[in-house]
Image (cartoon, helix red, strand yellow):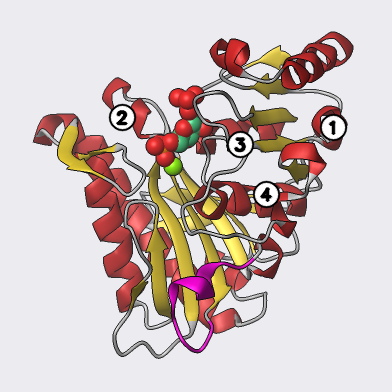
């Protein structure tokens, strides 16, 4: 049975990517422990700070961000880190490796107070020689690896290094990650559509019409957790589509290109799915202009995503 470390090392820059993935996996185990004790320790609720997106940070957003940073910085593989919770890229002093890691340390934080699923999302690039903010603005197709951790009833890590998408489950008893979902292939022609449909009045007429047609013709059921990791994980396993169209409140869409859309697009494509933004543009081909830019997202089974492409 292949290990997480073996699989992470398969792509280009194998050993470095392996070390960065191992660092994130270690941080994930620590974050899962914090999440499990959060209510008892009084770690739920707002931290009092507002992040670069203008969103109120939860205490656990800050705790997760610090855990991921500490592990990545100690890995030796990573020269720069960008986080959804931090305004700029941060460089790692005395780094041996040359990787750039972009991370959303705790995605879906509105689920925290209701004991719902949340996740950590990451993308790994080769860093340019000089780490300036522009160096991070690379299309997703140049990424070396992407993945997410889902904190649900079980702790799951899903990873791609380009070829294939593989799911691991944490065995707390043995203290190791077990390859439980090798070579995930997204089912086509079944599954669920997943969207915050309460916003439909704020979408374009075109988006409403496309969704109506898809619902009529595919007869997909509806599931929506409101945490992207959980909604994408189900979409990968069961098929269907996850979408977050632009609306009058978020004219560019809500989800972040670099921290959410690109990694999920890479994972979904490597599992045989499709991931597009507006007008059917492939998410992995978008040339980013800003670290925290937002994008519309439509990803999942090809036959469902085609209604929006
Ligand atoms: P967050 O990074 O602040 O948690 O926001 C991202 C989350 C995604 O996980 C999820 O898909 C989306 O926001 C849900 O948004 P909404 O509550 O508008 O449906
Ligand atoms: Mg997020």
Whole-percent x and y of residue 179? 59, 54
For label 2, the SS is: helix
- Local packing at callout 4 (Cα closer than 10 Å; few below 14, some 14-19, many 20+) is many
Give the labeled residue for mark 1: 188
Please name the residue shown 33% across and 58% down the image: 87
Task: Judge: label 1 CB < 8 Å from ligand 1.
Answer: no
Q: Is residue 180 left or right of residue 19?
A: right
Give the labeled residue for mark 3: 232
Given this view, does label 3 or label 4 mark the residue nearer the observer?
4
Image quarter for ligand 2 equals top left
| Label whose residue precedes the other's in the sequence (3 or 1) | 1
For label 3, the SS is: helix
Give the labeled residue for mark 4: 265
Give the labeled residue for mark 2: 112
Q: Is residue 281 left or right of residue 135?
A: right
For the residues bearing labels 4 and 2, Cβ distance under 8 angstroms: no
């Amino acid at each position: 049975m292949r290990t997480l470390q073996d699989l992470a090392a398969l792509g280009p820059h194998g050993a470095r990517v392996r070390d960065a993935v191992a660092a994130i996996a270690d941080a994930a185990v620590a974050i899962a422990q914090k999440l499990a004790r959060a209510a008892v320790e009084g770690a739920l609720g707002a931290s009092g700070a507002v992040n670069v997106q203008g969103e109120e940070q939860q205490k656990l957003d800050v705790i997760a961000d610090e855990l991921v940073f500490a592990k990545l910085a100690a890995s030796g593989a990573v020269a720069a880190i960008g986080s959804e919770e931090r305004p700029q890229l941060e460089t790692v002093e005395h780094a041996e490796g040359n990787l750039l890691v972009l991370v959303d340390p705790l995605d879906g934080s509105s689920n925290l107070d209701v004991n719902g699923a949340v996740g950590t999302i990451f993308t790994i690039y080769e860093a340019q020689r000089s780490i300036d903010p522009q160096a991070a603005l690379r299309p997703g197709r140049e990424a070396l690896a992407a993945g997410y951790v889902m904190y649900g009833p079980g702790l799951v890590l899903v990873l791609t290094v380009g070829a294939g998408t593989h799911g691991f489950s944490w065995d707390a008893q043995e203290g190791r990650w077990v390859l439980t979902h090798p070579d995930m292939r997204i089912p086509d022609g079944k599954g669920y559509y997943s969207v915050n449909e309460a916003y439909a009045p704020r979408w374009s007429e075109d988006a409403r019409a496309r969704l109506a047609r898809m619902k009529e013709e595919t007869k997909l059921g509806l599931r929506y957790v409101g945490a992207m990791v959980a909604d994408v994980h189900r979409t990968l396993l069961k098929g269907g589509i996850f979408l977050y169209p632009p609306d009058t409140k978020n004219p560019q869409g809500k989800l972040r290109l670099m921290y959410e859309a690109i990694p999920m697009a890479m994972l979904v494509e490597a599992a045989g799915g499709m991931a597009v933004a507006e007008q059917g543009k492939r998410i992995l081909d978008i040339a980013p202009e800003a670290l925290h830019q937002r994008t519309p997202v439509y990803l999942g089974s090809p036959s469902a995503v085609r209604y929006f492409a």
